[in-house]
Image: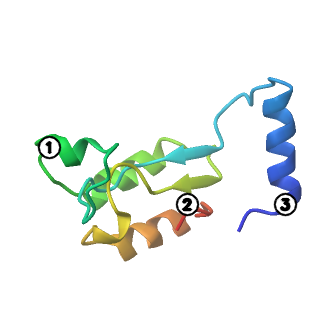
Amino acid sequence: MIPLAEKAGKFARLALRRRASLPTEVQVEITNRCNLSCPMCPHTFGNLPLSDMPLARFERILDQVPFATDIILTGWGEPLYHADFLALLDASELHQLRRDEV
């Protein structure tokens, strides 16, 4: 869980329109598979091929963002549907990334 003071600092920085030199938060869509039919989602009306991100690709992405402190594992899919979900969590922990969204 991200401390309240840190969230307040981020809010203040955004309100003052001061950007960080590098992003500290990274969002990765690890799967686009989902069991819902939300009206705003492209899965409901589109014909998207369903797939999971391979663990090796996820690890390469994490290697490319050493400055990140937080990771968000959501996107158009349900992260818990990923076959290697626990391995992805382990990989993010090895990179010392906080997961506030899981």
Sequence order check, earlier mark of 1 and 3 = 3
* Residue 66 seen: no
**In this view of the protein, which residue sits in the foreground, 90 or 36?**
36
Amino acid on which the number 1 mark rests in the picture: Leu
Per the image, label 1 sits on a secondary structure element best described as: loop
Image quadrant containing the N terminus: bottom right
Query: Which residue, given by chain and number where applicable, does mark 2 sit on?
Result: 95
User: Which residue is painted at 34% across and 62% down in the image?
Assistant: 78
Query: In this figure, which residue is indicated by the disc labeled 1?
Result: 48
Classify 93 as above or below 27.
Answer: below
Q: CA distance from mark 1 to mark 3?
A: 38 Å
Label pair 1/3, CB-CB below 8 angstroms: no
Disc 1 from disc 2: Cα separation: 31 Å
Crowd band around label 1 with a 10 angstrom C-alpha radius: few (<14), some (14–19), many (20+): few
Which numbered marker is on residue 4? 3
- Say if residue 57 shows up in the picture: yes
Pinpoint residue 99: horizontal percent, then vertical percent. Answer: 58, 64
Instruction: Name the foreground residue: 29 vs 89.
Output: 29
Q: Nearer the viewer, mark 1 or mark 2?
A: 1
